[in-house]
Image: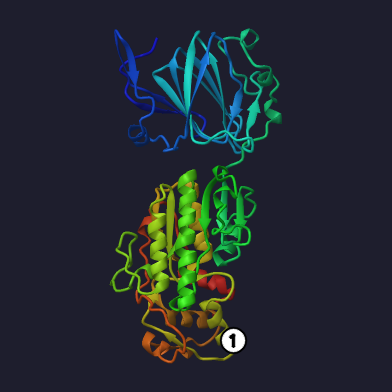
Amino acid sequence: MTEFGKQLTAIETPIPGLVVYELPVHGDSRGWFKENWQREKMTTLGLPDFGPVQNNISFNDAAGTTRGIHAEPWDKWVSVATGRIFGAWVDLRDGPTFGAVFTTELDPSRAIFVPRGVGNSYQTLEADTAYTYLVNDHWSPNASYSFLNLADETVAIDWPIPLTNAEISAKDLAHPRLADVTPIAPRKILVLGASGQLGSALREEFAGAGHVEFATRADLDLADPAIATARRWRDYGAIVNAAAYTAVDLAETADGRRDAWAANVTGVATLARLATENGLTLVHISSDYVFDGTLDRPYREDDPICPLGVYGQTKAAGDAIVSTVPRHYIVRTSWVIGEGKNFVRTMASLAERGIDPAVVDDQIGRLTFTADIAHGIRHLLDTKAPAGTYNITSSGDAMSWAEVARAVFSFTGNDPTRVTGVSTEDYFGTATGPVAPRPRNSVLDLARITGTGFAPSDGRASLLEYLGTPRD
């Protein structure tokens, strides 16, 4: 008999993400009523906001009707409308809990959230039993499914009605034993901008992770009208947008302005739409250039944006678009150093060639090594940190560009006094092309990202390691 008057309660199970929910059912002489799915209350309690797109009903005439153990590539919310069922769940996801089992009875006052890749099976305990399930994807012949035999000896499910007396389809009887099951792989991660500095660091960070894919513009053109069907997006869990237009000075020209807006805004809008429609996490790289640099303290994530130039304006616009995606991380960085041509390599080359540079000394910030950004992105995804904006730079004292240059000279065994500090105005005073305005203060506050348990590397130590040379 259905129990009335329960409090809405979540009960964890031994299978990660598989959660039983006690449901309030209100009844009287006329029957009963319950809220089968109440987004606000249930997500507050911890149920993932999984975005159901379809509601199915399974009606069963006789007790003992047993549905096979099926693992689908979507999440589902299962609850009983009439009668009682015995449920058996087996983790068929690739990972350390593969083969873990949980069983329980469900009636109208109990429901369960079944995460993607967990095999689920139901045996009716009463005649005329009906149960419903909400799912967050449509069935597709191109999706990946896994199945387990109901009688598998390894998981050894203790069915209340023996399988020899149960009503089972021939197809379900033919499913493989656990040793022959193909595990459900994790949702894929797609990294865009795979050939850039950050893309290279992400390749190293995710080396050996078969569920991470890398794409260049040649592989996936965001301007393609068919982008929505270019891939089966529901098989992905996250898109990391490591692609961007970053030529800050060239962005001040007519052609550069057009290209910057196309890459940093129009392309980002396409990704935001894909992520929202398919329930993906969108990771987007932002910049200190969204600020004007006039504060006398490090910039926090919630400080008002005030970009000075075209590049900063496009990055700010892209940030605003990404912030509308329900699952998003905006990773704000400054002074990025990775593989290829960059400020540190230029200074090291000048030092080696005996050239004494004049370097700007009235802009301050922290270097951000691409390895730190890649570590931070993986940390956010792995820990499922709250959505939002996170500053990620190297840690340690802020420095001017001139001080960074002197550190490079010193760490490569050269005299740091060979570096002369100059103002921004003097440095760019003889420029023959367009010059973008730069924020004078690019220091970003790291309290939010460190509060998630992430520890950025020390900037000076990372610089020494990057140069690959011992200090004198």
Position of 207 compared to 376: left or right? Answer: right
Residue at figure coordinates x 50%, y 48% from the top left: 382
Q: Which residue is mark 1?
A: 352
Residue at figure coordinates x 47%, y 69% from the top left: 260
Q: Position of residue 140 (x, y in %)?
A: 60, 35
| Position of the C terminus by quadrant | bottom right
Q: Position of residue 302 (x, y in %)?
A: 31, 59
Q: Which quadrant of the view contains residue 265?
A: bottom left
Q: Which quadrant of the view contains residue 232?
A: top right
Residue at figure coordinates x 59%, y 30% from the top left: 71
Position of 264 compared to 300: left or right? Answer: right
Residue at figure coordinates x 43%, y 51% from the top left: 328
Q: Which quadrant of the view contains residue 306?
A: bottom left
Query: As displayed, is residue 338 above or below residue 225?
Result: below
What is the three-letter code of the residue carrying label 1?
A: Glu
Residue 449 visible to the viewer: no
Position of 113 compared to 229: left or right? Answer: left
Position of 238 compared to 392: left or right? Answer: right
Residue 316 visible to the viewer: yes
Residue extending furthest front? Answer: 225
Secondary structure at badge 1 equals: helix
Q: Position of residue 12 (x, y in %)?
A: 44, 29
**Depth check, front residue: 65 or 337:** 65
Query: As displayed, is residue 408 above or below residue 151?
Result: below
| Position of the N terminus by quadrant | top left
Q: Badge 1, how many Cα within 10 Å: few under 14, some, many 20+?
A: few
Query: As displayed, is residue 84 above or below residue 440?
Result: above
- How many numbered markers are drawn? 1
Query: As displayed, is residue 159 above or below residue 240?
Result: above
Q: Position of residue 50 (x, y in %)?
A: 45, 37
